[in-house]
Image (spheres, rainbow, N blue to C red):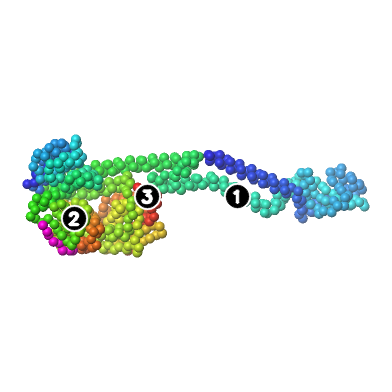
Amino acid sequence: MLNVLLIDDDISMADMLTELLGYENMKVTHVAAGQQGLNAALEGNFDVVLLDVMLPELNGFAVLEQLRKTTQVPVIMLTAKGDPADRVRGLNAGADDYLPKPFTDAELIARIQSVMRRFHTSTQPQTIRHLQSGELTLDKLRATVSVADETVSLTGTEFELLHELLMHAGQVLSKDKLSRAVLGRRQLPYDRSLDMHVSQLRKKLGNHIPEVPIVTRRGQGYLWADAVEEQA
Amino acid sequence: MKLFYRTFAWVTVTVITISLVTAVLVRLNADRAIEPNAEQRVYLEAQRKRIEQRLNRRMHLHLARTQGWLVSTDDEMAQGETAFFKARGNWVAGPMLVTVGDNRGAIFIPVPPELARKLQVQQWLALSPVLVFSIMAVLLVFSYLLARQLSRPITKLEQQAQPMAGGDFDAKIALKLVQRGDEVGALAVTLNKVSQAAHDAIAAQQRLLADVSHELRSPLARIGMAASLLQRKQGESREVERIQKEVEQLGELVGELLELSRQSIEKPKHQACSINELLAETTEIFELNERDISIEQQPLLTDASVMASPQLLHKIFNNLLDNAVRYANSKVVLSAERQGDSIAIAVADDGDGLSKTYFSELFKPFFRPELARDRASGGAGIGLAIVRSATVMLGGEVCVTHSNLGGLRFQVVLPLVNDGACGRL
């Protein structure tokens, strides 16, 4: 059972999310205002905090700032607009992930699971921490990717995508499988989100590696066509 | 200076010049004698004979004076050829030789008014062609100057107002025209105000559309969650699946509407974008498509760049490819070529195409030909409207023709050299 604190003033959505996450074995505590939310987060023993940016009284960034003074609990920021400035601000202030509103329940669940996976990697040092392919290194704990000690700046989704490809190196992953793992939803016909993320990932890695080993198999899917080593 | 005074001044100058030139020429010509033509010769000869007879009846030359004729016995006077000429403002014909008895004399007779008028015209017509052409040339120059004076600022204004007519209300009349201070300047100021008013009205509407779309997203997300809950509680059912599918489609439509309205409000940042990179990335995104359509790309031999917002550029070609993949039978060709100062990028498919009658409608929001409606794959009908709006924002043009592959061919022409319309912001 995962203890989730939801700080959001949209009560009807919070009610539904409480129920929906319940089916995923998550117990949701809902608080509607910033100050109360901060108090609850500091007092309670939560595994993850979902924090809305637009809150009455104390806004999300202020809550996050206060929260980070005492605890490293994973925080996912929920923002009204997909404003990149907000995203950077949230991540700089110490948020672990960021989800633009409106989101589907599947997307939220996927994000929570991904954040928890990362968090657990950090708390259980004996598990595999690094994935290495050629000069590329993916650090699961810090959620960073580097090529020959040079950091590659990836978005959360791109990181998840690369992680998924590296984990299944040498196997062709169908778009549906990747979409479920990375975006938390099934692949709909004519939805190009995943392909765009792959394109972006290729482009960003391409700035550091001459030949990015992401291969497109027509009619099948994407694959990481290079050997991957797991390291502690 | 006001246009009115300018026109007034130019007309005055023109009229005065014409009058002066004419007066001078007429005066120069006034002394010139006119040779009688055959008919006039007959008339003059008849007159001469009549006078000679009358004088012979009296046998006295000097009597002629009493009849109003001028007679001279001076031989020198009698030397010249008979002609019409002006003497003290009156037309006179002479000299004509008369013999009265043994005396000979030269006679000059006044010309009747009717003939005098004809002679006057004849005299004007007899002006040397060089002079006539000079007058015409001067007149032409002045007319040209006058016409240009009047029409040039208006033509300029018209040219600068053209983008407004095309719906670009960001366009402004240049300061040079606005600051003229005359009627044309006033018209320019008014045009700018009209353009601004139209711009504001459209912006307000777009903002409303953006706000409405944005506000629709949260309740849509809630409906989606409610449907998920229903599914959890009651298990899978066709109705819930239907709700989820509709919510997804509506969400997509609202997202695109939001995008369309945002495009008109926000000014995206421009940067140099490589054409071949654009082609490669677009191909990459669509390579793995559900209908297994092959995407062929024909890049430029030497790469070129356009000044554009990468987001808008990608949106244009993603939408075009999305359509092409939906309607192609097996192949889509993405090609680029130089066209002077522009770059033309075309997306062609080998599908069934569409009747030409629909072409002008294709870029209108929510227009979908019956063919597309029948297909389950048909989108919301807003993709091409976004393509057009984005292309216009980049200072380019988009058009559709039949493709020689069988389907449709969309061509986007973008300026290679950055001009004012899509300047760096």
Residue at figure coordinates x 20%, y 46% from the top left = A92
Is residue A222 covered in magenta?
yes
Q: Identify the disc placed on residue B185.
A: none
Instruction: Verify CB contact (< 8 Å) between mark 2 and mark 1.
Output: no
Q: Can you identify the residue that label 1 sits on?
A: B140
Q: Chain of mark 1?
A: B
Depth check: give the residue in front, A79 or B291: A79
Q: Can you identify the residue that label 2 sits on?
A: A145
Q: Can you identify the residue that label 3 sits on?
A: B423
Give the mark, 1 or 3, whose residue is nearer the N terminus. Answer: 1
The residue carrying pointer 1 sits among few (fewer than 14), some (14 to 19) or many (20 or more) residues within 10 Å by Cα, namely few
Is residue A89 covered in magenta?
no
Select label 2 or label 3 by which is in front: 2
Position of B30 with respect to A41 (left or right) is: right
Residue flagged by tag 2: what amino acid is it?
Answer: Val
Residue at figure coordinates x 65%, y 50% from the top left = B135
Image quadrant assignment for residue A195: bottom left
